[in-house]
Image (tube, grey):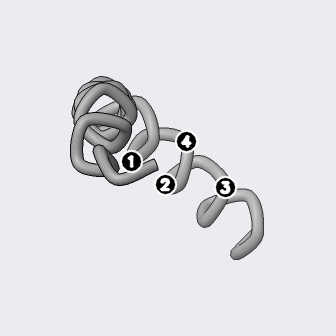
Amino acid sequence: MCLIERSRRSLSRRAQYAPTLCRRVMLWLLAYPRRQTKN
């Protein structure tokens, strides 16, 4: 039962933090190549 509760909690957390993580990843991917101008 503990595993099921943990999986449900993790899914709920992912559902809540998914949009924020996606935004951070997209912004990071867009800003990362700009930072590396030497290459």
Residue 21 placed where, x, y %? 33, 39
Tell me the residue that label 1 is attached to: 13
Q: CA distance from mark 3 to mark 4?
A: 6 Å
The residue at the point 55 percent across, 42 percent down is 11
Tell me whether the residue at label 4 lies in contact with that at label 1, contact meaning CB atoms closer than 8 angstroms: yes
Image quadrant containing the N terminus: bottom right
Q: Which mark is residue 9?
A: 2
Q: CA distance from mark 1 to mark 3?
A: 10 Å
Q: CA distance from mark 4 to mark 2?
A: 5 Å
Horizontal relation, residue 18 to residue 7: left or right: left
Tell me the residue that label 3 is attached to: 7
Residue nearest the observer in this picture, 34 or 12: 34
Can residue 17 be seen here? The reply is: no
Tell me whether the residue at label 1 lies in contact with that at label 2, contact meaning CB atoms closer than 8 angstroms: yes
Tell me whether the residue at label 4 lies in contact with that at label 2, contact meaning CB atoms closer than 8 angstroms: yes
Q: Inspect the image, locate mark 1, and give the three-letter code of the amino acid beneath it.
A: Arg
Q: CA distance from mark 2 to mark 3?
A: 5 Å
Q: Is disc 4 surrounded by few (<14), some (14 to 19) or many (20+) residues within 10 Å?
A: few
Tell me whether the residue at label 2 lies in contact with that at label 3, contact meaning CB atoms closer than 8 angstroms: yes
Q: Is residue 20 above or below residue 11?
A: above
Residue 32 placed where, x, y %? 33, 43
Tell me the residue that label 4 is attached to: 11
Residue 9 placed where, x, y %? 49, 54
Q: Which secondary structure, mark 4?
A: helix
